[in-house]
Amino acid sequence: RSLQAASQRHEPGTVQTDICYIKATETPYESGILTGYTQGDLHLVNVTGDHFSVMTTPTVDQVARAVITLLAQPKQLVQ
């Protein structure tokens, strides 16, 4: 209950960097919910599955490839 109460009270600020949202295709959340939290670009990577299956084989391989690709890109400095 305390986790749920804390998440309901939490109001994240805005960051001045890009956000990458790795989204499970069977998750109801849309990437648009994050646009208000960044002054940078929002990058969406869809992976097959739901919230839990994205961390199991073979979908976790898609997640790993997405993270490796993102980490290989030049970094934008957080201001």
Image (tube, grey):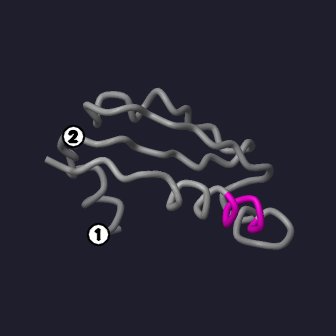
Image side of residue 15 versus residue 18, left or right: left
Image side of residue 30 versus residue 79, left or right: right
Q: CA distance from mark 2 to mark 1?
A: 30 Å
Which mark is on residue 16? Answer: 2
Q: Quadrant of residue 19?
A: top left
Which residue reaches farthest front?
A: 74
Question: How would you rate the neighbour count of disc 1 (Cα within 10 Å): few for under 14, some for 14-19, many for 20 or more?
Answer: few
Amino acid on which disc 2 is placed: Gln
Q: Nearer the viewer, mark 2 or mark 1?
A: 2
Query: Magenta span has 24?
Result: no
Q: Quadrant of residue 68?
A: bottom right
Q: Earlier in the sequence, mark 2 or mark 1?
A: 1
Eyeballing the image, is 23 above or below 61? Answer: above
Which mark is on residue 2? Answer: 1
Camera-nearest residue between 67 and 26: 67
Picture quarter with the N terminus: bottom left
> Under tag 2, what secondary structure?
loop
- Residue 60 in the image, given as x and y percentages of width and height: 74, 67
